[in-house]
Image (tube, helix red, strand yellow):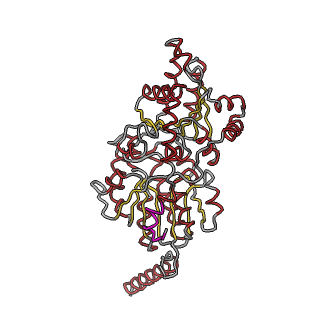
Amino acid sequence: MERSHIITAAVLVWVLDLVVLLLFWPKRYTKTAKSKVSAQVLVLGDIGRSPRMQYHALSIAKHGGSVELIGYNESPPLAELVQHTNVRIWGLSAPPKLLQSKAVPFILTAPFKVLWQIYDLWMVLCYKTPPCEFLIVQNPPSIPTLAIAFLVSLVRNHRVVIDWHNYGWTILAGTRGPSHLFVRISKLYECLFAKAGNENIAVTNAMARQLQKPPYGIKNRVVAMHDRPATIFSPMSNSSERLKFLSRLLENEAMASTIVDGKARLIVSSTSWTPDEDFGLLLDALTKYAGQTETSQAKEAETTPLLAIITGKGPQKAMYEDKIAQLTQKGLLPGIRIQTMFLPFEDYATLLASADLGVCLHKSSSGVDLPMKVVDMFGAGLPVAAYSGYESFSELVKEGENGCGFETPDELSATLSRLLQPSGAKELSVLKNGAVKEGSRRWDEEWDAVVAPILGISA
């Protein structure tokens, strides 16, 4: 008798589980003849600081598709994106502050932070948003994004498109070391779930080639789509507009006038203030540039004053601001003023167009990614001096055509001295023309040629 009760109870529990599962099972995507393209666009990061994913969302919306843009609402997204009727933005919940605290060891907080993200992603991707034809995922971060994307695709019948910006494990290796247990686990995980993408987009040709070889071994299609500037980035030729903008930004019309007249030069660098962008290299180069005045009277007469504006926010910002203050107090930066700012997107675009030279400190952890900030600089007609010690550098920066490469403070200092003195005006003009040419191919053109066919969109 007891045995029959147990069997009956087990059957009832099984039936109840099945009913609950059917009632709460996420709705699956079903394509019809009248279906327009629809996509969830996921970035496990700040939406406002993820321009490429915002551009993907906007491109789909412009072609009449519906977009569910998912990420953290920390910085304001593009106004055009917010106002578009085809786009809905879904904010993820930030993990508790305890899990973000650096006071608690990483090995203790990391697993709980991942569990938090798994639950949050699952709820948003499966229940809060409608089923879509595509799930476009930014990588990195790969943990837990790639695994969740794979599971969601099984449950909701989505096609997964992985947009490869870099590799998560190489970034982790930069802070933990390549032999760290978490790094080895991260690499195995990323190589396993790399194959989850029905389609794959890489930011460089070098990365696309690498993804198709061991240890990734992706068999599905991998295409390269280089970052291209959005229309908000455009060259500025009107000196009065430049003066007006710089006067407002600097709150100092006299300094703005000096820059516009060419008596001083404006350089701009955008940084995330993290170890993979060595801001100390730029500081050392500026110190060497300023130190030229001590070598001879002739050098002193030639050295052009500089204003260096550094934009962005990140963990090492305060540390470097202290270092800048110390160098200034010691008189090691004569003729150089360094300002840090965090600007609205529109002002950042105008700042690039108003500058004389852009400086990029990006050091590729994988050797095959490229910094989007250089793309934006070219869109604004701004030539660059960029760190060049990685394989894919030449896919974007052409030495002597639209910019110059460097690997050491001495090389960067020499580049600044050569280009920013009156004698370098001709070379700087050549580089500027090259930057304008490189930036003339825009995001929409590149996207329509490469990504639109993947999504079945007729461009």
**59 sits left or right of 190 in the view:** right
Taking the spot 46% from the left edge, 42% from the top edge, the residue there is 105
How far across and how far down the image is residue 186, in percent? 37, 51
Specify start and end residues of the magenta stretch as a single range: 447-458
Taking the spot 57% from the left edge, 26% from the top edge, the residue there is 324
How far across and how far down the image is residue 261, in percent? 65, 30
Q: Magenta segment: does it hold 302?
A: no
Q: Nearer the viewer, residue 93 or 194?
A: 194
How far across and how far down the image is residue 134, in percent? 47, 69
Q: Is residue 290 above or below residue 245?
A: above
Q: Nearer the viewer, residue 71 or 381?
A: 381
How far across and how far down the image is residue 330, in percent? 58, 17
Q: Is residue 183 above or below residue 299?
A: below
Is most of the magenta stretch helix, strand or loop? loop
Q: Quadrant of residue 158 in the image?
A: bottom left
**323 sits left or right of 385 in the view:** right
> Which residue of the protein is positioned furthest toward the top in this rendering?
297
> Which residue of the protein is positioned furthest toward the front in this rendering?
426
**93 sits left or right of 282 in the view:** right
**258 sits left or right of 198 in the view:** right
Q: Nearer the viewer, residue 435 or 326?
A: 435
Q: Quadrant of residue 302 in the image?
A: top right
